[in-house]
Image (cartoon, rainbow, N blue to C red):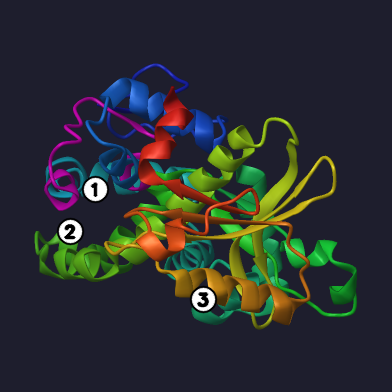
Amino acid sequence: MYRCYNVEKLSKGVPIILSKKSLLEQFQSFHKEFNPKTMEDAVEKFAIFGGVGWGNLDTSKESMQLIEELILPDFRFIRNDVTELTTGLPLHHAILTAIALGDGRTHTAYRRANVSKEVGDKAIEELCESGIIRLEKSKATFTSWKENESVSNKLYFTSPFLRFWFAFISPIFKGIRDGDYKEIRERFANRKSEFLQLTFVELAHELIKMNFVEDPIVEIGEYWDNKIELDIFATTESGEVVVGICKYTTTKVKKSELTKLQELCKEAKIEADIFVIVSKSGFSKELKNLKSKEVRFITLKNFQKLVA
């Protein structure tokens, strides 16, 4: 059985209906339905299976094992559902794969898909209207010093599962169709952390909004220009600027990362009032000693607040 959170169960072969829930609402629904034992399991499994309900999803299992149990055997059924959703146009699939495999910027996606800006813009408009993706502007566009610089927009999938599909399944569908799973196993092993990073960042944005109670966040997203990228750029009601990075790695974040963040802000001419570092694996003792009102830390355990 195969369904979305906001509709009744659908039988195989019925088109996927995209949920109108926000990413946070999808994460909360996912967590409530499958009750992962750890927040790491919650984030990782949500990044792969989120946005679509599954009749049986044991989040304690390894991700690749679940992929082989739930997705690959039903590849043809799910592919039909995805095709119904995307209208099956090769152009749309090329663009979606380019977004899933790249940095999300429109010009990068067009280059990967080998299409002109005019053709790409039209496809993006159609895909946004269908609800499959959304377009966001860099927070660089909110800084006056960047007024005369052109900064490409970024594209985000509204469903984590669809991003996974176009990153790992669609590009190598022939082998999967023929029952050869070697390539997807290798691809997933090599790109797993990189793939999970974006979901980690998006959920971190939601947590930061919850944490700023006395001085609420009014705008938050990613910052990028033609040289610099920052995972977190936010402004509060009082006008304070919050800048930060997210590290979905197996090692503790060191003091050098804060120094690097401060240097990037200086280079981008961003006058940050508060620095936030979000880490999957914690922080070095040296870095923790710098904790203050202006330097704040968030760990994976803190993500529990999202589903409390």
Q: Are marks 2 and 1 in contact (CB under 8 Å)?
A: yes
**Residue 294 percent coordinates (x, y):** 65, 54
Please check the rendered image and state whether residue 65 is part of the magenta-colored stretch, yes or no: yes
Sequence-wise first label, 3 or 2: 3
Secondary structure at badge 1 equals helix
Furthest residue in direction top, as rendered: 8
Disc 1 to disc 3, how far (Cα)? 24 Å
Which of 68 and 194 lies nearest the eye of the viewer?
Answer: 194
285 left or right of 232 in image: left
- Quarter holding residue 43: top left
> What is the three-letter code of the residue carrying label 3?
Ala
Residue at figure coordinates x 49%, y 50% from the top left:
297
Q: Which residue is mark 1?
A: 76
Sequence-wise first label, 1 or 3: 1
> What is the three-letter code of the residue carrying label 2?
Arg
Please indicate, yes or no, whether residue 122 appears anywhere in the rendered image: yes
Determine crowd level at label 3: few under 14, some 14-19, many 20+ residues with C-alpha closer than 10 A: some
- Quarter holding residue 37: top left
* Label tally: 3
Which span is picked out in magenta? 47-66
Which of 273 and 48 lies nearest the eye of the viewer?
Answer: 273
Residue 113, disc: 3
Sequence-wise first label, 2 or 1: 1
Which of 8 and 260 lies nearest the eye of the viewer?
Answer: 260
Secondary structure at badge 2 equals helix
Disc 3 to disc 2, how far (Cα)? 23 Å
> What is the three-letter code of the residue carrying label 1?
Arg
Q: Which residue is mark 2?
A: 177
Please check the rendered image and state whether residue 91 is part of the magenta-colored stretch, yes or no: no
